[in-house]
Amino acid sequence: MRWTEPERSIALTSFDQTHRPLVVGIGGTTRAASSTERALGFALRGAEQAGARTRLFGGEFLHRLPHYAPEHPHRTDEQLELIEAVRAADALVIATPGYHGGVSGLVKNALDTLEELRADERPYLDGRAAGCIVTAYGWQATGSVLASLRSIVHALRGWPTPFGAGINTLETRFDSATTCSDPKVAEQLATVGRQAATFALAFNTPRPANAKLAA
Ligand SMILES: Cc1cc2nc3c(=O)[nH]c(=O)nc-3n(C[C@H](O)[C@H](O)[C@H](O)COP(=O)(O)O)c2cc1C
């Protein structure tokens, strides 16, 4: 996505330069060339162009998370890493493939792990925007799974961004991490990231004292 220089400087100077918002991306599949993870990368670069810092938890990382079991008190290093990152986040972008008409188990397990944020001063995704992205092999699941993912964000007290991206991977290819066969899709993904980042500014959510990630 290309911004004109005036647009870019407005976005960059709008943010408090001592606290560039952190946008955390969660998504992908176990496949090395996951189109879902690549789509998420496009969205996070849109957030960066709006002045945000970003961190991506992709398929490989999500695959290392154990199945979330609330009754077990022990949390793995990976679980704690994800929990602390989301705790410190000013906004999120979540990307899932449509699997059998729903959010994939891999992504849902990561979102279930956020149950650990329930007792925070700012519980779950409270006060945070969450951009939503769905890839699917056809149009039907892109729409239904996007609605489902937004419902999950609502349940977590987050604010789905006005624009959510549904990508039909029968029509759009991501041949590398930085190439997308359809410039309109690339722009839509950047819009998701940009809306998540700019919401962080508009909402101006103060970070809780227990947020541990360094600025
Ligand atoms: C287990 C499984 C279930 C799937 N279910 C659906 C589905 O219900 N509808 C659909 O359109 N595509 C479905 N797909 C296709 C994926 O959503 C699609 O290929 C997606 O873009 C894969 O993302 P990736 O490239 O990040 O792995 C399914 C794929 C798998 C592996």
Image: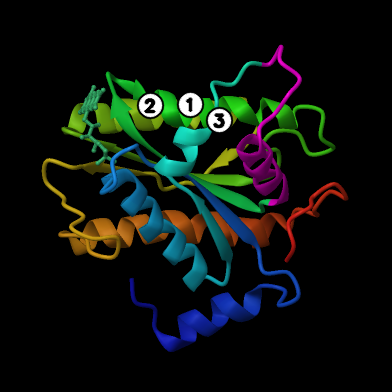
Which residue in the protein does label 2 denote?
104
Q: Residue at x 23, y 64 (%)?
A: 179
Amino acid tagged 3: Leu
* Earlier-in-chain disc, 3 versus 2: 2
Q: Is residue 137 left or right of residue 35?
A: left
Q: Residue at x 54, y 84 (%)?
A: 9
The span from disc 1 to disc 3 (Cα, nearest Å) is: 5 Å
Q: What is the crowding at mark 2: few (fewer than 14 residues within 10 Å), some, or many (at least 20)? A: some
The numbered disc on residue 27 is none
Q: Residue furthest bottom?
A: 5
Q: Are marks 3 and 2 in contact (CB under 8 Å)?
A: no
| Residue nearest the observer in this picture, 96 or 71 | 71
In which quadrant of the rendered image does the N terminus lie? bottom left
**Relative to the observer, which residue lies in front, 187 or 101?**
101
Tags 1 and 2 touching, CB below 8 Å: yes
Q: In terms of depth relative to the viewer, which is nearer, 191 or 47?
A: 47
Residues shaded magenta: 70-88
Foreground residue among 211 and 146: 211
Q: Is residue 207 left or right of residue 139?
A: right
Amino acid on which disc 1 is placed = Lys
Dot 3 beta carbon under 8 Å from ligand 1: no
Residue closest to the far right: 209
Circle 1/circle 3 CB separation < 8 Å? yes
- Left or right: 82 as drawn, with respect to 26: right
